[in-house]
Image (spheres, rainbow, N blue to C red):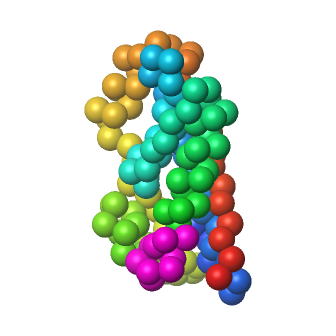
Amino acid sequence: MNTHRIKHDEKKLTVQVQVFLIPDGNQHVAYCPALELSSYGSSPDDAKTAFAEAMEIFVADTQAKGTLEKVLLGLGWTLQQHPVARYEPPRPSVEFLNALGSGKRGEIRTVRQRLAVAY
């Protein structure tokens, strides 16, 4: 199942990515390998909220600079133009997934983070 989506229309950009919620001591890290973006909080919900804010800043900043596509391609995303424009992220590496698996089972969760930015 593809959990990453980036859609453009005439008035807004919608981004949806997969985020790993990883316990780390007394903190929880929200990490998105597809964007190489992370944040943290004292609970999974705090980490998700902080990640949503970081992602909003990331997307707004790269949109304002006109560099979103360049940054995504630099992160290993690919762009298929036909029949409709679709960005595909790189897959997390086996090493990354194995490292997640070596942690405490059942504590690592994945969520989808969605953001719509008007322009």
Quarter of the rendering occupied by the C terminus: bottom right
The structure residue drawn at horizontal position 37% and vertical position 17%, both measured from the top left corner, is 102
Decide whether residue 6 is among the magenta residues. Answer: no
Residue 88 at x, y = what percent? 47, 62
Residue 10 at x, y = what percent? 69, 86
Q: Residue furthest bottom?
A: 10
Q: Nearer the viewer, residue 107 or 3?
A: 107
The structure residue drawn at horizontal position 34% and vertical position 60%, both measured from the top left corner, is 75
Decide whether residue 62 is among the magenta residues. Answer: yes
Q: How many marks?
A: 0
Q: Is residue 12 left or right of residue 76?
A: right
Q: Is residue 8 left or right of residue 76?
A: right
Residue 110 appears in the picture as rendered: no
Q: Is residue 92 left or right of residue 5?
A: left
Position above or below: 109 against 10: above
Residue 47 at x, y = what percent? 58, 36
Position above or below: 104 against 12: above
Q: Is residue 70 left or right of residue 9?
A: left
Residue 3 at x, y = what percent? 58, 50
Q: Residue furthest top?
A: 104
- Please name the predominant secondary structure of the magenta segment in the image: helix
The structure residue drawn at horizontal position 36% and vertical position 75%, both measured from the top left corner, is 70
Position above or below: 38 against 116: above
Bounds of the magenta segment: 60-68
Q: Nearer the viewer, residue 43 or 68?
A: 43
